[in-house]
Image (cartoon, rainbow, N blue to C red):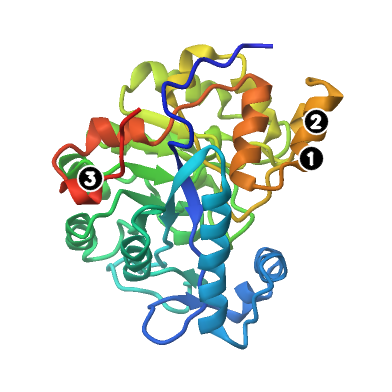
Amino acid sequence: MTAMPQLKQREKSLIDCHVHLAALPEGTNGCLISEKMLKSPLFRFLLWKHQLSPTDPAAANRKYIQDLLEELRASQHVQQAVLLGMDGVYTNDGRMDPHATEFLISNDYVLEQAKAHPNEFLAGVSINPQRIDAIEELQRCAELGATLVKVLPNAQQFDPGHYRYKKFYRELARLGLPLLSHVGYEFSLIGKDQSVGDPNRLQTALEEGATVIAAHGCSYGLMVYEKFYPTILQFVNRYPNFYADISALTLPNRLGMLLKLRHHPEIFDRLIFGTDYPLSVFHLPLWGLASFSTIRRMMLTTNRFDRQYLVCQNMGLGFVSFNTIIQSTQPSLPSDALPSTDI
């Protein structure tokens, strides 16, 4: 088993760069969810897992935040979480398409939660570059303390490799905001064109100077077939501004990439810690690779942040904290918008 490199950090100083903020529409939070999405397996699981009532949106939203805060504060290894928003679908002329948008978590709601809990949350806003005011929204969110920009091309229905978004990517680079992009198939939300989950389409952003984090370790998301395995190795060598997060890699459909990446210590400093909360973290990857006592300890670890840390560590997969990217890309942001990076 490949030994995991020492993480040069204090205890409980990790930042989880991939935590989903979920909310039901209520009041003026600017969020949206379709009836179809509300009945999907993901949201049924979410409602069951957190005992949320869709008939009382305000109470459900408060409980989701409280559950997240409690689990994060109880973690032995993770100090902060980047809350991810979800922008909508936009027409070719850059207007919001409410009929095609199944799920939306507004940037204002993300920023509000990060401001309310600065010791635990960082703002990961979502901006579809196809929107007519994409650059203006990017600048606004940066001024309000956003830490990164998350996109999910499969569900937001845009091609991240299109030349029309070059100006947007250049502005990301100028502002020092990383782009976290979903990679592979999309099952949780409604994916239209799955081909836009190809990490090769992120070259446009990389070549315009933006720091890019490919989600889920560049996993294809279809069980053991990992067509993007060569891509992540090539991109790490080619682009110093390329990273991947390790979120969701313990899930059965992405396990294949976890098993491959653990053999490449030369890229561990480009792998960023993340969980994909509120999704589950599985101890399945350890079977056959760790002792029964280790597996039993993972089974007894119910905190998802800690289980992700410990499973990946015991798999021999090295990773670093999102602090690494903050230090290298955001020196110009106001000091009160940055988490502690004393590692």
In three-dimensional space, the C-alpha distance between marks 3 and 2, rounded to whole angstroms, equals: 42 Å
Mark 3 packing: few (<14 Cα in 10 Å), some, or many (20+)?
many
Q: Amino acid at mark 1?
A: Met
Name the spot of residue 325 as percent of width and height, x first: 32, 33
Q: Residue at x 40, y 50 (%)?
A: 159
In three-dimensional space, the C-alpha distance between marks 2 and 1, rounded to whole angstroms, equals: 6 Å
Mark 2 packing: few (<14 Cα in 10 Å), some, or many (20+)?
many
Q: Which residue is mark 1?
A: 299
Viewport quadrant of the C terminus: top left
Label placed on residue 172: 3
Q: Residue at x 77, y 34 (%)?
A: 297
- Front of the two marks 3 and 1: 1
Q: Amino acid at mark 3?
A: Leu
Horizontal side of residue 144 vs 280, given as left or right: left
Q: Which residue is mark 2?
A: 295
Q: Are marks 3 and 1 in contact (CB under 8 Å)?
A: no
Q: Residue at x 52, y 51 (%)?
A: 73
Camera-side residue: 233 or 123? Answer: 123
Q: Residue at x 48, y 12 (%)?
A: 266
